[in-house]
Amino acid sequence: MKHNSENESQRAQDLIKRLPPAKLSVVIALMETILDPVKAAIENAPMDDEEITPETAAALDEAREWLKHNKGIPHEEVLAELGITKEEIDNFKEPK
């Protein structure tokens, strides 16, 4: 049975209208995931619960203070200075 886009859209709307309210949130979440999978992945990612050490906190404070008085350095510039290309990063694979 072949359906055109308009018929499919109407069919989807009719099915949604028949759903009990308790099931709507599941359908909405599925549709949002289909429409924007990256956003869904970010929203469903586990919270980073790694404790910030005093050393890390101090380094972050130092970096924030530095940025108050200096212009940030673009990522590409840092990579170039280190002799690394974006392609190398994109294609990097962890050693086994």
Image (cartoon, helix red, strand yellow):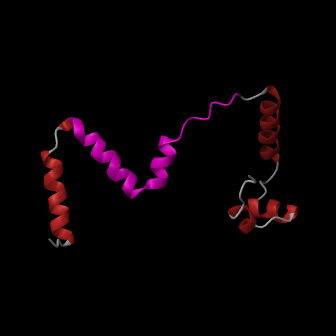
Residue 53, percent from left and from top: 77, 27
Q: Nearer the viewer, residue 32 or 3?
A: 3
Callout count:
0
24 in relation to 15, above or below: above
Please report the residue visible at 74 percent of the width from the left and 52 percent of the height from the top. 96
Residue 42, magenta (yes or no): yes
Please report the residue visible at 82 percent of the width from the left and 46 percent of the height from the top. 69
Residue 56, percent from left and from top: 79, 33
44 in relation to 8, above or below: above
Residue 36, percent from left and from top: 42, 56
Question: In the figure, is residue 64 to the left or right of 41?
Answer: right
Q: What range is drawn magenta here? A: 22-51
Query: Taken as a whole, is the magenta stretch helix, strand or loop?
Result: helix
Please report the residue visible at 87 percent of the width from the left and 63 percent of the height from the top. 81
Please report the residue visible at 22 percent of the width from the left and 35 percent of the height from the top. 22
Question: In the figure, is residue 14 to the left or right of 82?
Answer: left
Residue 39, magenta (yes or no): yes
49 in relation to 45, above or below: above
Question: In the figure, is residue 35 to the left or right of 22?
Answer: right
Q: Nearer the viewer, residue 91 or 17?
A: 91
